[in-house]
Amino acid sequence: MSTLTSVPDALARARDVVHPAMVAAVERLNPELGRVAAYHLGWCDEHGAPSARAGGKGVRPALAVLSAEAAGADAAAGIPGAVAVELVHNFSLLHDDVIDGDRERRHRPTVWALYGVGSAVLAGDALLTLGHQVLLEHGRTGAAASAELSDAVAAMIGGQADDMAFEGRSDVTSDECLGMVAGKTGALLACAAAIGAVLAAAPAPMVAALRSYGAHLGVAFQAVDDILGIWGDPERTGKPRGNDLSTRKKSLPVVFALGGDDRGSAGELRRLLLNGPLDAGAVSRASELVEACGARQATEALAREHLHAACRALAGAGLAATACAELADLARFVVEREF
Amino acid sequence: MSTLTSVPDALARARDVVHPAMVAAVERLNPELGRVAAYHLGWCDEHGAPSARAGGKGVRPALAVLSAEAAGADAAAGIPGAVAVELVHNFSLLHDDVIDGDRERRHRPTVWALYGVGSAVLAGDALLTLGHQVLLEHGRTGAAASAELSDAVAAMIGGQADDMAFEGRSDVTSDECLGMVAGKTGALLACAAAIGAVLAAAPAPMVAALRSYGAHLGVAFQAVDDILGIWGDPERTGKPRGNDLSTRKKSLPVVFALGGDDRGSAGELRRLLLNGPLDAGAVSRASELVEACGARQATEALAREHLHAACRALAGAGLAATACAELADLARFVVEREF
C-alpha cells in the first residue's frame, strides 16, 4: 500500500468536500468576526484580499470524514463533524496564540498581533460556538456529536491549563505530561476520529475504536510536534528554532530528560531551565543536553508506540476496510512527516 | 402585589436551589481553572480563602427556574438551564473584562488583572464549555436547551463585536444600537427566560412567549445599565463615574443624543467624542450634553416601554399564573432598581 502519495490526495479530497461547508458556516458570523476568521483560516490577507488557501493540513476534517466512511456511511454524513472540529481547532489556535503570546503562525502575524487581543478572543469564542451550532442542527446524532465535542473541548482546555501550570515547575512527571498531552492534543483528535461515526449513528464499540485510534494518534502527533519544537527546521515549523526550550515548555522530550539522574546532563538541564527564559546559547546547549539524556530517542519511540496502538485500535470493531486502511495511512503520514 | 420585598426573596430562593448545582459543575473543572472560576464567582478571595457569596444578583438563574415553573414543571427541571446560563454569563464577563481592559469588577480585581490574560481567556472557555456539558447530559430536552444556548451565545458574541466596532464610529444609528443591545444583552436573558420551559418540554408557543419576555427585559435592562454607566453612583456600579463616556462607548443615551440636531448640544457632544479618550472635565461636560439632548429621558422611556412589552409577552400563552406574576415582578425590580 502506498503511503506518502495517497495521503495528500486523501487530505485534498476531504478539504474539497468540507471547504464549501466551512465557508457557509463562517458566512453566518457577524461580518467583523467573519473577516477576522477568514484571515486566520488563510482565506484572505490582512486587507481582506483573497489568498491561496494556506491553512493547516486539514487532518481533523479528514479524520471526521473517514470516520463516517469507516462506520459504513457516506463521507457527507461526516461533514458537520468535520466543520465543527475544524472550527474548534481554530478556536483553540486563536486563544492559544493569545495565551502563549505567539506573534506568528504559518509565517503570518497571528490574529491578536494584527487585530488586537479582544478580536482574537472574540473570534475564538465565535468559532467554538459556531461549531456547536453546526452540530445541533442535525437532530439526535448531532446532539450526541455536540456532547462528544463538548467533552473533548473540556479535556483540551484542562490540558492547556496543565501546560501553563507546568511551565513554572521542574518536577513534572512523565505521567503528568502524558495526561496533559492526552487532553491538549489527544482529545480533539479522538473526537475528530469518532464524530463521523457518531453522526452516522454507529454502534458504541465502533465509536470507541475510532476514539481510541484518535487518542493514540494525538499522543504520537504531539510527540512529533515536541521533537520539531526543539530540533525542527524553523522554515518548516514556522516558529523560531528551539522555541519550546526558550519558553521552558514542559514538552515530552524535556520531561523525559529531566526524569534522568540529577548528577549528569539532567542536572545541568534542570539548572539551565531554572534560570528564567533562555537565550540562544542556552537554548542550543539545552537541546544538546535533552538529546544526551536519550530523551529525543525516547520521544521518537513513544510516537511509534502510539502510532502502532492507533492502528491496532482499528481492528476487530467491524469498521469498513478501505476507510480503516486510509486512517492507518493517515496516522503514519502524520507521525512520519519529519523523521 | 408587593414588588420590592418579594423579588429579593425570589432571587435568594433561586440562588439556594441553584448554588449546589453550580458548585458541583465548577468542581468538574481542572483544579487550576476551578480556583480561578471560584475567585471570579466571588466564592473565595485571591488566596483561595472562602468568602461570602458576593457574585451578581442571580437574575439569569432565577429566570431559568421561573421559566420551568411558568411551563408547569418543578423548579428542579430548570436547574441545569440555570447553571448553564449562569456559567455562560460568567464566561462573557471574564472575556469582556479582557476585551474592555477593565481592571475592576464588583470592587475586586478582575481575573485577567490578577491571574493574567491567559488564565482569564482559558477560564472563560472552560465555563462556556461546561455550560453545554451540563445541558447535554439531559437527553433530548437538554440538547434542545443546548441549541437554544448556542444561538444565544452566537448572538451575544455578535453584539459584543458590534459594540467594539461602534466605539470607533460616531454615526451609529438607534436601530444599529438596539440591534447590538438585543444581541449583547437581550439574547442571553431571552435564553434564560426560555430555557427552563425548553427543559420542561413545553410547547413552542410557551417557549416563544418566555423568550420574547426575556428579549424585551434585556433591552430594558441594558437601557438602565447605560443610564447608570453615565449617571450612576460609582459606589453602587463598581465602576468609575462616567466610565462609558470616557471610553466613548456607543451606549443608548449617547446614540440617542448624537442623533440630534448637529448645531446644538449634539454637535458639541460629537466634537468632544471625536477627540480621543475623554478626561474627567470632558466626561462631566459630555454627560450634561447627553442630558440636554433629552437622551436620558429617551433612554428611560425606552426602558419602560420594553418593560411593559416584556410583561405583555407573558399573556395568553397558557403560562402558570404565579410564575408569570413573579416574572413580571422580577422585570420591574430589575428595571426600576435605580430610578
Image: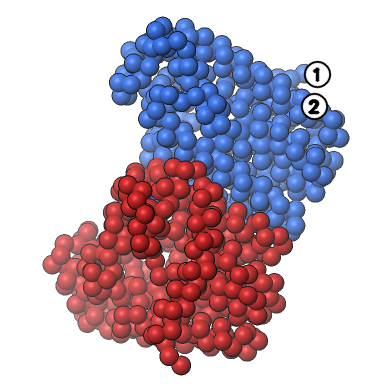
Chain colours: A blue, B red
Q: Mark 1 points at which residue?
A: A1
Residue occupying the point 66% across, 56% down? B137
Residue occupying the point 27% across, 84% down? B294
Give the side of residue B112 with respect to residue B319, left or right.
Answer: left
Who is closer to the viewer here, A38 or A222?
Answer: A222
Binning the other alpha carbons within 10 Å of mark 2 as few (below 14), some (14 to 19) or many (20 upward) gives: some
Q: Mark 2 points at which residue?
A: A325
What is the spatial separation of the Cα atoms under label 2 and label 1, in whole angstroms? 9 Å
Who is closer to the viewer here, A200 or B270?
Answer: A200
- The picture quadrant where one finds residue A72 is top right
Residue occupying the point 33% across, 21% down? A274
- The picture quadrant where one finds residue A9 is top right
**Residue B27 in sight here:** yes
**Residue B182 in sight here:** no
Who is closer to the viewer here, B217 or A1?
Answer: B217
The furthest residue to the front = B50
Give the side of residue A238 with respect to residue B289, left or right.
Answer: right
On the image, the x and y values in percent for residue B44 come to: 36, 54
Whether the residues at callouts 2 and 1 have beta carbons within 8 Å, the answer is yes
Residue occupying the point 47% across, 78% down? B10
Name the chain under label 1: A
Question: What secondary structure is marked by label 1?
Answer: loop
